[in-house]
């Protein structure tokens, strides 16, 4: 238990409202968006500066508390859940945009800035920050970096890591760090900034992020295609990529998802269709037109049931917005929503869809699948009820078997959510025990005492003793 | 525990009127509600967010938490603006869960003897009795007539008292005689008759804005509808739900249900967004205490006046131009609780001569929220300031809304901020377009 003296010290240094320790606060800061994972911290602090953060860490050190960083708690792998209790360091109140450098095409912001706020601020200056996680209205930039968040535009523009130029923050030994800079080229030593991006808060606490900006695409075309079966949609994706067309977005939804989304947004999506693809091509007007024609031709070749081109920007925005609600719309259907982010090489999309269908039947589950088809990143989502033990067991077996297939086809167990708690058990299957060992040594080098976000990515101790899969994706209360 | 049993799980809640466990479990904690919640935006505190409040309710249901003072405080700190309901794709109704928690709070933290007596008098005796309500406004009217109000406002005497008193005094519009005793039981349709509607006259409308509801009746008649106003109409029950008194709310609901079901009318129309939302929720409120069939029929007849006019189609002949620019503030209980957003705008667009200038964040709460704006006057001011900033940017002549709570708050805010906009109810605006002889 954290001592009352420590609480008093924290309040003195950080201010009363920046230190929360009542049970009601702890209960509401021990979760993120990952189903079934809830652990209470002992105290939650909201530092306003790196110095205050060091102060808080110093007190945590004295009290022997592990540290868990937290943005807005939108993560889907349990990354910000304080599994070992201790101190949660909230970053959502460090939310100033510090600079938009139009000469260097960079933006610098505190870690708690909401992604969409940064996007809008740079857009107002005629610039473009491409990473766009599904939770962009809520998620923080620091959280995006820590989880290396992806998004709908990942196919053409890449993910968060691809835009990080500089990171500032605090290391577990309570020293400040700064890695990277505004220089476009920088090969001085190890690429710590790339290592930090996606480290899930296990190596250091990020306080400030400088990202690369690019000029916005001048033109955009949105195409919507419906299919009578999911495999054809998968085939269309593979063919478009094989034709060397890289759309900015190529999103897929299956029938279950289409119906849930339509129930929610009511924009007239046809409920009987097996799948839809939402494709956006953007860039300079001439190639955009050419690519849009190319996409259309391929859709016709594979015999898409219907092909629509968005009437105008507003219509296109409606379609994209509909896709953004997919996960949450599915969530209406059942009390518990288990979402995964299985990712396969794009040439294997059609067969992966086939596999999902087969396993859905085999385990008798309700599954909706949507995702970033263009980068092979699928979100098979089991709609279930956590109170039904048998259904939960079947859901677990479903994912277990699916991941075997995904790995066999050269895919990854996490395309964008991170390993966190949810995928720990699968990690060594993908990168091998040697790979896990190396990761642990890196963790050891940064955080020899193991105080920073313990229990994430892998368990401490022998890498061979991977926990049972069940614990991997459902940690009990 | 079997699945059926767990559906009824009430844990540390009082079993009667506990939040449904299924409703609470539905929250997947995606956080879509966070940026839409005024109290979260104000405090940055998770427990003051819809996601956090639902998590608290869940913890109480799962016996991980007592129904603590903090739970009670969060239930009352919630504005019940329902913006989170609009934002929640999973369909969680955090506002309603908190409404139920307010009722729970009364049994966990009962008031002292005086407080209890006062509360009982106001909620159980005064508000349900139109006569008492009208009588209670008499001193205020006298106070205004005799010019004392002018003196008080100008001498700033009230600044010496608690904030909410000064604000409450400042918010009260110039009062006229209540409308209820003046309205004829039936106002006949003008021109070709299109139907017969019941008019649900709300308490605040009759007492504070009689001239608005007079226009509503005038508009409905001019549009070709007989307007039936049952004189016995009682409060819709919304204030009781808001203060956590579901028992009296049920009693009033049952009374109004029977009253309107006895009338031969096609629709039940109201010009108060708060009343409309409450009436539409009678079905759930009375689920166990009234006949299901009549609840369904009653529910199917309720319309906000803008929803009604849009649905039946506005008869445009004879309307005279109102040359003005207006901006529209969406009452939470219209846009979030009833999903009515497009209809009031369509009504505005049908008024000849009017130019609608959209403000940013038109569906962001104004910070009134029944008594919230008085209880949390500092927070309310911050919510209001954001709204006024958006109004100011439109530079419109009029600020139009459709709910008396918003009307009071906005009119007060505009005056305090020295802004030029006049606040009008949508029906007042439309009333200006009616030919003078349509009285």
Image (tube, coloured by chain):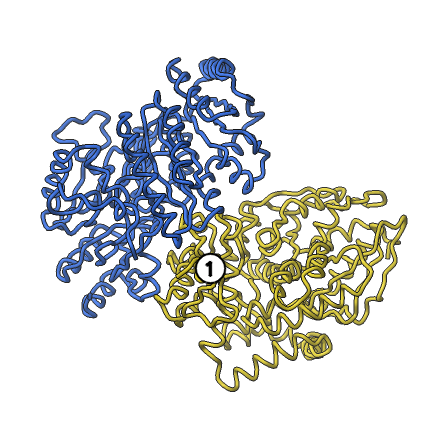
Q: Which residue is drawn at 37% across and 15% down?
A: A242
Q: Which of B215 and B47 is in front in this view?
A: B47
Q: Which residue is drawn at 47% across and 51% down?
A: B36
What residue is shown with label 1? B4
Q: Residue at x 66, y 43 (%)?
A: B356
Q: In this view, does B344 lie to the left or right of B371?
A: right
Q: Nearer the viewer, residue A365 or A21?
A: A365
- Number of marks drawn: 1
Q: Which residue is drawn at 25% across and 44% down?
A: A469
Quadrant of the snapshot with the N terminus of chain B: bottom left
Q: In this view, does A267 lie to the left or right of A46?
A: right
Q: Which of A277 and A474 is in front in this view?
A: A474
Element marked by disc 1: helix
* Chain with yellow colouring: B
Q: Which of A323 and B133 is in front in this view?
A: A323
10 Å crowding of disc 1: few (<14), some (14-19), many (20+): few
Residue A110 visible in image: no
Q: Is residue A373 left or right of residue A70?
A: right
In the rendered image of the structure, the colour used to display chain A is blue
Residue A435 image position (x, y, % from top left): 15, 34
Residue A197 image position (x, y, % from top left): 24, 37
Up the image or down, B3 lies above or below B121; here it is above
């Amino acid at each position: 238990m954290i001592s009352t003296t420590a609480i008093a010290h924290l309040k003195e240094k950080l201010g009363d409202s920046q230190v929360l320790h009542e049970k009601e606060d702890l209960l509401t800061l021990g979760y993120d968006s990952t189903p079934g994972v809830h652990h209470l911290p002992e105290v939650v602090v909201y530092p306003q500066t790196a110095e205050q953060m060091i102060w808080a860490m110093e007190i945590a050190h004295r009290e022997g508390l592990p540290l868990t960083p937290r943005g807005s708690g939108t993560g889907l792998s349990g990354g910000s859940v304080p599994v070992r209790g201790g101190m949660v360091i909230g970053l959502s109140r460090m939310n100033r945009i510090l600079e938009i450098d139009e000469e260097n095409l960079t933006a610098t912001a505190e870690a708690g800035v909401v992604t969409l706020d940064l996007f809008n601020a740079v857009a107002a200056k005629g610039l473009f920050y491409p990473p766009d996680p599904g939770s962009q209205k809520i998620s923080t930039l620091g959280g995006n970096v820590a989880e290396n968040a992806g998004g709908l535009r990942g196919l053409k523009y890449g993910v968060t890591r691809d835009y990080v130029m500089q990171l500032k923050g605090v290391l577990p030994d309570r020293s400040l760090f700064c890695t990277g800079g505004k220089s476009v080229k920088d090969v001085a030593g190890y690429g710590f900034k790339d290592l930090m991006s996606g480290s899930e808060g296990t190596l250091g606490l990020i306080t400030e992020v400088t990202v690369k900006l690019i000029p916005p695409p001048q033109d955009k075309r949105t195409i919507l295609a419906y299919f009578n079966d999911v495999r054809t949609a998968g085939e269309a994706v593979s063919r478009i990529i094989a034709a060397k067309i890289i759309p900015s977005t190529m999103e897929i939804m299956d029938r279950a998802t289409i119906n849930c989304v339509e129930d929610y947004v009511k924009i007239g999506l046809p409920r009987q269709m097996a799948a839809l693809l939402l494709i956006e091509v953007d860039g300079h007007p001439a190639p955009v037109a050419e690519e849009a024609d190319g996409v259309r031709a391929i859709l016709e070749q594979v015999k898409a049931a219907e092909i629509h081109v968005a009437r105008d920007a507003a219509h296109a925005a409606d379609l994209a917005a509909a896709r953004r609600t997919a996960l949450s719309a599915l969530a209406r259907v059942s009390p518990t929503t288990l979402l995964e982010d299985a990712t396969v090489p794009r040439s294997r999309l059609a067969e992966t869809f086939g596999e999902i269908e087969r396993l859905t039947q085999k385990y008798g589950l309700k599954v909706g699948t949507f995702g970033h088809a263009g980068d092979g990143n699928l979100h098979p989502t089991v709609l279930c009820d956590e109170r039904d033990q048998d259904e939960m067991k079947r859901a677990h077996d479903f994912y277990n078997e699916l991941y075997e297939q995904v790995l066999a086809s050269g895919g990854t167990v996490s395309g964008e959510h991170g390993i966190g708690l949810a995928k720990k058990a699968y990690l060594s299957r993908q990168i091998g025990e040697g790979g896990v060992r190396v990761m642990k040594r890196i963790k050891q080098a940064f955080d020899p005492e193991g105080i920073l976000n313990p229990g994430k990515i892998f368990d401490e101790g022998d890498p061979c003793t991977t926990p049972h899969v069940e614990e991997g994706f459902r940690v009990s209360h | 525990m079997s699945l059926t049993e767990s559906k009824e799980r009430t844990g540390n809640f009082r079993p009667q009127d506990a939040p449904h466990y299924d409703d609470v479990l539905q929250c997947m904690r995606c956080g879509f509600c966070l940026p839409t919640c005024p109290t979260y935006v104000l405090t940055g505190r998770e427990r003051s967010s819809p996601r956090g409040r639902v998590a608290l309710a869940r913890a109480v249901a799962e016996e991980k938490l007592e129904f603590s003072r903090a739970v009670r405080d969060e239930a009352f700190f919630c504005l019940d603006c329902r913006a989170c309901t609009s934002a929640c794709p999973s369909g969680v109704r955090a506002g309603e869960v908190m409404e139920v928690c307010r009722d729970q709070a009364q049994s966990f933290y009962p008031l002292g003897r005086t407080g209890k007596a006062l509360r009982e008098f106001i909620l159980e005796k005064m508000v349900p009795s139109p006569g008492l309500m009208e009588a209670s406004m008499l001193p205020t009217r006298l106070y205004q007539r005799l010019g004392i109000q002018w003196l008080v406002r100008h001498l700033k005497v009230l600044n010496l008292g608690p904030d909410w008193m000064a604000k409450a005094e400042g918010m009260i519009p110039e009062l006229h005689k209540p409308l209820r005793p003046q309205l004829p039981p039936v106002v006949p349709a003008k021109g070709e008759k299109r139907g017969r509607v019941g008019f649900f006259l709300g308490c605040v409308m009759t007492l504070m804005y009689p001239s608005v509801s007079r226009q509503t009746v005038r508009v409905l008649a001019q549009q070709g509808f007989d307007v039936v106003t049952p004189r016995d109409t009682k409060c819709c029950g919304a204030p009781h739900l808001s203060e956590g008194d579901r028992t009296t709310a049920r009693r009033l609901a049952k009374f109004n249900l029977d009253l309107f079901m006895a009338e031969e009318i096609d629709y039940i129309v109201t010009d108060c967004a708060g009343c409309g939302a409450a009436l539409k929720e009678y079905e759930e409120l009375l689920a166990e205490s009234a006949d299901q069939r009549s609840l369904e029929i009653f529910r199917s007849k309720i319309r906000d006046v803008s929803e009604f006019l849009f649905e039946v189609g506005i008869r445009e002949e004879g309307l005279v131009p109102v040359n003005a620019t207006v901006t529209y503030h969406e009452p939470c209980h219209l846009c979030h609780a009833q999903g009515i957003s497009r209809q009031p705008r369509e009504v505005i667009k049908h008024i000849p001569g009017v130019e609608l200038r959209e403000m940013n964040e038109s569906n962001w709460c104004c910070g009134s929220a029944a008594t919230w704006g008085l209880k949390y006057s500092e927070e309310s001011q911050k919510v209001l300031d954001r709204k006024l900033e958006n109004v100011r940017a439109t530079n419109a002549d009029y600020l139009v809304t459709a709910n008396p709570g918003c009307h009071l708050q906005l009119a007060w805010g505009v005056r305090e901020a020295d802004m030029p906009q006049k606040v009008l109810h949508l029906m007042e605006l439309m009333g200006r377009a009616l030919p003078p002889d349509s009285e």
